[in-house]
């Protein structure tokens, strides 16, 4: 029963803690139990008595109709009627009973309060012992609920930690991807630069060879007379420039 109560209390705290209970009219109730319309039972206490054994309610019943002296008058009148009509015969057993009643009355007035106090203490001790087990069970259930909540809180923390680890792994994968992409870019650029340098070098070598071939062929084509004439023309041009 306490386990079901603990589960219901946890469910009630997680869900909406209010409900509508109809008893005469709809009322808003918080928690699992409507303490107002359905109070918890308590240990009954004995009511007040008069003359040691007559309930106070009897006197209140007569008081509303006959006043304060009504119940006493009724009791004395009833006894007088029983004795006068010999409905209740006062034989030797009557006087024995009267003597016993006097002794009981004396004992109750003499030792009654102490005995009542002792019995009240015993009843309170019994009730305390009974409630001790119930309260200890409730305390253990509350501790179990608190432990379960702490475990749930830790589980939520583990979920956050797992999410953080996943995010960290994703960041590492992103970093590795970027690093590999940079490596691929550098390798491709290096190879393209190599091809460009190779092409430029081949072009320079080809140009140099072409110039050397042209110069060599032109030089071979010039005769000594043409060379002499060209030399004389150059000297003449220099002389003319010098005069100017």
Image (cartoon, rainbow, N blue to C red):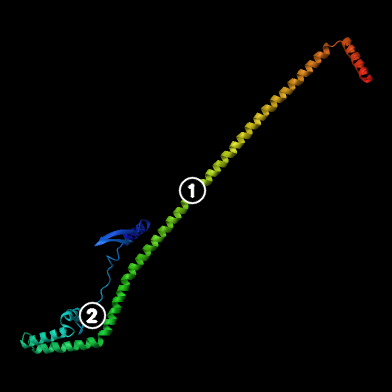
Which label number is shown at residue 222?
Answer: none
- Relative to 9, residue 87 above or below: below
Front residue of 117 and 185 = 185
What residue occupies the far front of the structure in this picture? Answer: 244
Q: Position of residue 187 (x, y in %)?
A: 63, 33
Which label number is shown at residue 163?
Answer: 1
- Relative to 159, residue 79 above or below: below
- Look at 6% across and 88% down and name the residue there: 84
The quadrant of the picture occupied by the C terminus is top right
Q: Earlier in the sequence, mark 1 or mark 2?
A: 2
Q: Is residue 160 left or right of residue 212?
A: left
User: At numbered mark 1, what does the secondary structure look like: helix, strand or loop?
Assistant: helix
Q: Classify mark 1: residues with Cα within 10 Å, few (<14), some (14-19) or many (20+).
A: few
- Relative to 45, residue 213 above or below: above
Q: Quadrant of residue 98?
A: bottom left
Q: Quadrant of residue 134?
A: bottom left
Q: Is residue 210 left or right of residue 68?
A: right
Q: Position of residue 127 (x, y in %)?
A: 30, 73
């Amino acid at each position: 029963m306490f386990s079901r109560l603990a589960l219901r209390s946890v469910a009630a705290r997680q869900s909406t803690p209010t409900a509508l209970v109809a008893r005469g009219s709809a009322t808003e109730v918080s928690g699992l139990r409507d303490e107002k319309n359905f109070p918890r039972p308590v240990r009954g206490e004995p009511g007040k008595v008069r003359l040691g054994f007559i309930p106070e309610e009897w006197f209140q019943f007569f008081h509303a109709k006959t006043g304060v002296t009504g119940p006493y008058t009724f009791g004395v009148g009833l006894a007088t009627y029983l004795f006068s009509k010999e409905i209740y015969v006062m034989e030797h057993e009557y006087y024995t009973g009267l003597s016993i009643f006097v002794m009981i009355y004396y004992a109750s007035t003499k030792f009654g309060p102490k005995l009542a106090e002792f019995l009240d203490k015993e009843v309170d001790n019994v009730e305390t012992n009974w409630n001790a087990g119930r309260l200890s069970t409730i305390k253990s259930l509350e501790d179990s609920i608190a432990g379960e909540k702490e475990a749930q809180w830790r589980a939520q923390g583990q979920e956050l930690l797992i999410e953080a680890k996943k995010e960290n792994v994703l960041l590492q994968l992103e970093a590795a991807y970027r690093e590999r992409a940079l490596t691929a870019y550098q390798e491709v650029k290096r190879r393209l630069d190599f091809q460009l340098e190779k092409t430029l070098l081949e072009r320079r070598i080809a140009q140099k060879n072409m110039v050397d071939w042209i110069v060599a062929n032109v030089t071979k084509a010039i005769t000594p007379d043409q060379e002499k004439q060209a030399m004389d023309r150059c000297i003449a041009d220099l002389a003319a420039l010098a005069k100017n």
